[in-house]
Image (tube, helix red, strand yellow):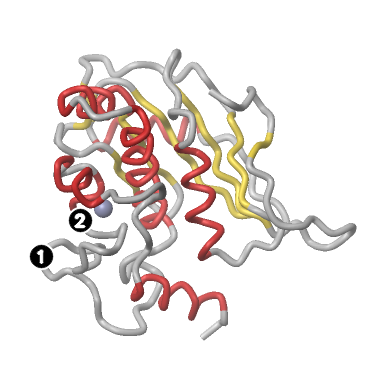
Amino acid sequence: MDFLNGEIVGLAGEQGGAAPINRRIVELDTQASLAPRNGSAAGLIEALLEVVDKPGGVFIVEDESDLPAADDGVWTFAELQVLAQEHVGIEESNGEISLHTMWLGGEYENPNVLGVAWGNRHLAMFGERIDRACNGLLIGALTCSLAEATIWTHEVGHVIGLVDRGTPMVNDHKDPEHPAHDVSRESVMYWAYDGTDFTELIGALTGNSVIPWGAECERDLEAVRNGN
Ligand SMILES: [Zn+2]
């Protein structure tokens, strides 16, 4: 991993003197020996900088690195909620908004889901399960890192209220079959990109960056930035 315990990485944007901090913090807690791949944190930061109004920057702060394993290797949603309450550690201060990511072994109660988000604050990423999905398809490290960053970005998208879950829609683009998701496959908020259909996610990855937010999600987030 390319960042150290407790250190802030991903500095972007200017931090001017006594101005309000106005930055977004992604608190990262990991299970022992698990961590995001090199490059996936950078992919998330790049995606967030495109849409959030945080002139102080977007930071990932590694906090705890000894989260417990699931008793039986399977995380239920109720267990994740308890874990999150026990380990969320970063206080939000003036101008700061923080998201809480937990990087876990084992798998979710629906093993096809590789990341899950809730409560406009928390998200869990199933790192070991992502490894297995990547190895099963024998895809390269670069593509795997991009897939991981895409899933992480998708979950952060849920936390920031996409689609129509706190961030109002300018135009209707929510998927009636999959609430909180974008109807368009061109958007990172398409339902399959939480890993539910990993093959589809890999198929959608082209080029060297995370799947874009898509026109409608960008429009919604722009309206929030402009205070509309
Ligand atoms: Zn989703």
**Quarter of image, res 197:** top left
Label 2: how many residues lie within 10 Å, few (<14), some (14-19) or many (20+)? many
In front of the other: 173 or 165: 173
Task: Estimate the x, y position of residue 122 in percent, counting from the top left.
Answer: 42, 44
Question: Dots 2 and 1: beta carbons under 8 Å?
Answer: yes
For label 1, the residue is: 177
Residue sitting at x 24%, y 26%: 129
In front of the other: 168 or 217: 217
Residue at the extreme right: 17
Q: From the viewer's perspective, tell me whether residue 23 is left or right of residue 192.
A: right
**142 w.r.t. 20: above or below:** above
Label 1: how many residues lie within 10 Å, few (<14), some (14-19) or many (20+)? few
Q: From the viewer's perspective, tell me whether residue 38 is left or right of residue 177.
A: right
Task: Estimate the x, y position of residue 120 in percent, counting from the top left.
Answer: 42, 55
Q: From the viewer's perspective, tell me whether residue 179 is left or right of residue 46.
A: left
Dot 2 or dot 1: first in sequence order is: 1
Q: Nearer the viewer, mark 2 or mark 1?
A: 2
Residue sitting at x 36%, y 37%: 124
Specify the amino acid type for callout 1: Glu
Task: Estimate the x, y position of residue 126 in percent, counting from the top left.
Answer: 31, 30
Q: Secondary structure at mark 1?
A: loop
Residue sitting at x 41%, y 51%: 156
Specify the amino acid type for callout 2: Trp
Residue sitting at x 52%, y 34%: 28
User: How many numbered callouts?
Assistant: 2
Q: Residue 76: which numbered mark, if any? A: none
Question: Does the Cβ of the disc 1 residue fall within 8 Å of ligand 1?
Answer: no
Task: Estimate the x, y position of residue 178 in percent, counting from the top left.
Answer: 15, 61
Residue at the extreme left: 177
For label 2, the residue is: 191
Question: Does the Cβ of the disc 2 residue fall within 8 Å of ligand 1?
Answer: yes
In front of the other: 167 or 129: 129
